[in-house]
Image (cartoon, grey):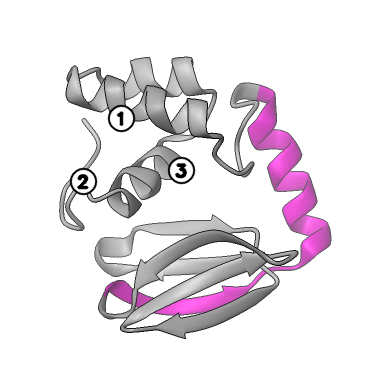
Amino acid sequence: MVRVMLEDADYCDVPADLMTFDDGTVVFWRDGEEVGRHRQPRIRSLELLDSRSMTRKIQAARRNHPKAFRPWSAEDEQLLIEMFHNQAGKEAMIEALGRQEGGIATRLRGLGLLADDQKLL
């Protein structure tokens, strides 16, 4: 697990075991599959997290957000896009997708729907 500290004191935890660099972007991988990406200028620091403590954090997060830290399915991603375009609020997205606010915002940024300096409303 890698904690990616972003500008404006924002961060996300990425379940990655490998990082590569691609044209100004850091790409995170786990078991050979891409699990996330961030533009290098936005990253302030990277921190490797203790996997044992992360397991407990993931389990705790999944009590309220069952899909926290899981890869996005095509169906979930499509629902996110639809909800975003229909101007659903942050709480509605969290409830419908079973994910944490940070995971939703990060995915929207990855899809180019939420600017780096925008917050999820």
Q: Nearer the viewer, mark 3 or mark 1?
A: 1
- Look at label 3 and name its amino acid: Gly
At 48% from the left and 72% from the top, the residue drawn is 27
Instruction: Give the Cα distance between marks 3 and 2.
Output: 12 Å
At 41% from the left and 36% from the top, the residue drawn is 101
Front in this rendered view, residue 30 or 118: 30
Dot label at residue 103? 3
Instruction: Give the Cα distance between marks 3 and 1.
Output: 14 Å
Residue 84, percent from left and from top: 24, 27
Q: Which residues are magenta?
A: 42-63
Q: Main secondary structure of the magenta part?
A: helix
Q: Say if mark 1 contacts mark 2, CB within 8 Å.
A: no
Residue 15, percent from left and from top: 65, 59
- Look at label 1 and name its amino acid: Ile
Residue 18, percent from left and from top: 65, 76
At 25% from the left and 36% from the top, the residue drawn is 120
Dot label at residue 114? 2
The residue that label 1 is drawn on is 81
Front in this rendered view, residue 70 or 47: 70
Q: How many marks?
A: 3
Q: Earlier in the sequence, mark 3 or mark 1?
A: 1
- In this rendering, is residue 89 above or below 51? above
Res 72 → quadrant: top right
